[in-house]
Image (cartoon, helix red, strand yellow):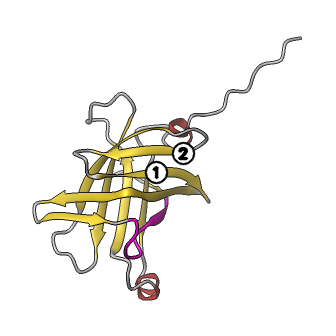
Amino acid sequence: MFATPTFAQSPQDLMFPSADSCYQRSYTAAHLAKHPAQRVTELRLGPDAGMAATGLALRVEVRLRGTPGGWFEGYGYCESAGGVTLDCLMEGDAGDFAVTPARGGILVTVGRSGMSFENDAGFVTLERNRGDDRSFLLRPSPCG
């Protein structure tokens, strides 16, 4: 009788097993009232099959209070950082972030370089050492 080795799932397979593995968080008015320095009101993240990448490409979208223009978007290219963490570099030198599994979803943590996003109205940046937009607990959500 031979023992069959157990293969650990990669971070990508664990958190994004399919193209429909998306996550989102919409913050309540009560949460935002307790965190006046938090600008992010909504954040969603999921695979972007349209982006050519050798690893996992993620589309990240945010809405910010006090910032007109609706949804801002950015793209991250992610690779395993060892263990269960994905390290992601934003397209166009727009910063970095990490993704780890957490309590029934994922935790997105802003990297040292921040995270910058754009839309037709302009650019916005989340800074790691300023404000209250440093990490976000997202839950599974339909893509789109």
Q: What's the magenta region?
A: 128-139
Name the residue furthest top.
Answer: 1
Name the residue furthest right.
Answer: 1
Q: Quadrant of the N terminus?
A: top right
Residue at image coords 28%, 68%: 63
**How far across and down, in percent of the image, does residue 11 sit?**
54, 39
Front residue of 10/110: it is 110
Residue at image coords 61%, 40%: 83
Q: Is residue 56 left or right of residue 14?
A: left
Name the residue furthest left.
Answer: 120
**How far across and down, in percent of the image, does residue 18 sit?**
46, 37
Front residue of 128/71: it is 128
Reply yes or no: does residue 68 show up in magenta.
Answer: no
Residue at image coords 36%, 27%: 54
Q: The disc labelled 1 sits on which kind of residue?
A: Ala
**How far across and down, in percent of the image, does residue 95 sit?**
31, 52
Q: The disc labelled 2 sits on which kind of residue?
A: Thr
Give the mark, 1 or 2, whose residue is nearer the N terminus: 2
Q: Which residue is mark 1?
A: 98
Distance CA(mark 1)–CA(mark 2): 7 Å
Q: Quadrant of residue 52?
A: top left
Residue at image coords 40%, 57%: 112
CB within 8 Å, label 1 to label 2 = yes
Q: Is residue 42 left or right of residue 138?
A: left
**Dot 2, how many residues are within 10 Å of its Cα: few (below 14), some (14-19), or many (20+)?**
some
Q: Which residue is mark 2?
A: 85
